[in-house]
Structure formats: structure tokens, C-alpha cells
Amino acid sequence: QVQLVESGGGLVQAGGSLRLSCAASGRTFSGYVMGWFRQAPGKEREFVAYVTWPGRRTYYADSVKGRFTISRDNAKNTVYLQMNSLKPEDTAVYYCARDRDSSGSIYASGYMYWGQGTQVTVAS
């Protein structure tokens, strides 16, 4: 059974920081691209960032570039999303996901396994 479990969400003031974590079960992590997506109420799920295996390359949505940092600890089967300078428009449920074929994608359809999501709320 593949499991991705996110944690670290919460309520923060604008300008603040949060670090999200996503713990993956063993064989699902090695060799694959890991991504973060988010979904705000009434909106479609959107790409945030991804990191390749073993962590040499990252890619970000323009809306978070320079503020968010994705990383992975392969020994712990965990991927992180460090979020700084948070804005109210960053409010959403954040999901981590493992891609299908290690190619990296900015589309949700390119990811096979998903976590349950963690809520991030940024107050103005």
C-alpha cells in the first residue's frame, strides 16, 4: 500500500513561514519525482513545485518562486516544502504527490499517488 502523509500545515500571519513535510512509504520514494500541489476553495488543484531524484533539480510555479523551497531527505523518505513570506493567496490545502514515470510534471495527471492534504491558512 502506497502512503504519503503530509504534516506541518496551520494558521500563520502574512509574511510568516511554515514548513510542510511529506513522509512516504519505502519503495514509493526512491527514483521518483516528488511534487507539491495546492487547491484553494472553488479553484482547481495547481502545481507548486517538484524535486527530481535524488534531489539535483527543482522546479517552481512562478507564483511561489523565490519564496518556497522544495527539498527531499532520501534517507528519511521525506519531502519538504519550506514556505517563506507567505501571502493570503497562498491559503489552500497542500498535497504532496509522487509522479508516474520520473519525468517530472507540472500537471496533476502526471502524478500517481497523493497524500490526504494539509491545510495552510494565511491571515492578512
Image (cartoon, rainbow, N blue to C red):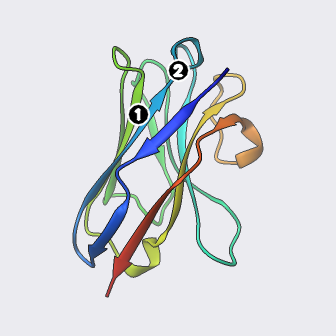
Q: Does 124 sit left or right of 61 as displayed?
A: left
Name the outermost residue toward the right.
109
Badge 2 crowding class, 10 Å Cα cut-off, few under 14, some 14 to 19, many 20 or more, is some
Picture quarter with the N terminus: top right
Badge 1 crowding class, 10 Å Cα cut-off, few under 14, some 14 to 19, many 20 or more, is many
Q: Does 122 sit left or right of 34 as displayed?
A: left
Q: Amino acid at mark 2?
A: Ser
Q: Amino acid at mark 1?
A: Val
Q: How many marks?
A: 2
Q: Residue at x 55, y 14 (%)?
A: 31
Q: Find disc 2 in the rendering and name its residue.
A: 25
Name the outermost residue toward the front.
1
Label whose residue precedes the other's in the sequence (2 or 1) = 2
**Image location of residue 41, percent across then percent down:** 63, 76
**Image location of residue 29, percent across then percent down:** 53, 19
Q: Residue at x 71, y 47 (%)?
A: 108
Task: Work out whether residue 80 or residue 120 is closer to the camera in this orientation and state it.
Answer: 120
Q: Find disc 1 in the rendering and name its residue.
A: 79
Q: Residue at x 40, y 73 (%)?
A: 121
Residue 103 location, quadrant = top right
Q: Is residue 36 above or below residue 11?
A: above
Tag shown at residue 51: none
